[in-house]
Amino acid sequence: MSENKPVYVTKEGLEKMKKELEYLMTVERKRISKQIAEARDKGDLSENAEYDAAKEAQALLETRIAELQRRIQNSRVLDERNLNADTVNLMNKVKLKNLKTGQIVQYQIVPENESDFKSGKIAVTTPIAKGLLGHKKGDKVKIRVPAGEIEFEILEISL
């Protein structure tokens, strides 16, 4: 992944990343350092599984911290005042009708790091989101997904 690639986020998404970073740096670092110290006190490090596990946890933690720092540094907060509901775009809510089953679903298209399928938020990088981008209310769109091809009608676009 490019070091300078912008990461588009909502204001809430940026705050969530900042809170996670602060938690990892202030709470988790201390907890893992304590685990390493306790394991070190148990003697021979060459055969100390607790020490190895704590060092591995520390490496994973530092990787996550570095990733969050990079993402925060490259974040570009989306200005929702510049968004519209004329065509499907990032941050829009889209109500769709599956033309084969008649099922109606609603998704919000969000930056990749804010996706949460259970709450209806799909990443802009998903096949469905990519297939909807730029289309208007009333358009019928065929989208290729891993399970095959689905045809949707766009019923509504909102902010």
Image: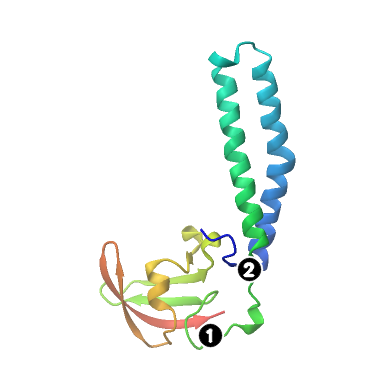
Task: Give the residue type at disc 2.
Answer: Thr
Residue occupying the point 59% across, 44% down: 63
- Neighbour tally class for label 1: few under 14, some 14-19, many 20 plus, Cα within 10 Å: some
Residue 73 position in % (x across, y down): 67, 61
Q: At numbered mark 1, what does the secondary structure look like: helix, strand or loop?
A: loop
Relative horizontal placement of residue 85, taking residue 70 as reference (left or right)? left
Relative horizontal placement of residue 80, taking residue 85 as reference (left or right)? right
Residue occupying the point 45% across, 72% down: 106
**On the image, numbered disc 2 is attached to which residue?**
10
Residue 58 position in % (x across, y down): 62, 34
Q: Specify the quadrant of the image occupied by residue 131.
A: bottom left
Which color scheme is applied?
rainbow
Residue 95 position in % (x across, y down): 44, 77
- Neighbour tally class for label 2: few under 14, some 14-19, many 20 plus, Cα within 10 Å: some
**On the image, numbered disc 1 is attached to which residue?**
85
Q: Specify the quadrant of the image occupied by residue 43.
A: top right
Viewer-side residue, 118 vs 149 = 149
Q: Nearer the viewer, mark 1 or mark 2?
A: 2
For marks 1 and 2, give the CA distance.
17 Å
Q: At numbered mark 2, what does the secondary structure look like: helix, strand or loop?
A: loop
Q: Residue furthest front?
A: 3
Residue occupying the point 41% across, 73% down: 130
Residue 89 position in % (x across, y down): 50, 79
- Which quarter of the rendering shows the C terminus? bottom right
Relative horizontal placement of residue 130, taking residue 38 as reference (left or right)? left
Asked whether the residues under the numbered discs 1 and 2 touch, taking CB atoms below 8 Å apart as contact, a structural biologist would say no
Q: Is residue 87 above or below residue 26?
A: below
Task: Give the residue type at disc 1.
Answer: Ala
Viewer-side residue, 76 vs 4 = 4
Residue occupying the point 58% across, 33% down: 57
Q: Residue furthest top?
A: 43
Name the N-terminal-most of marks 1 and 2.
Answer: 2
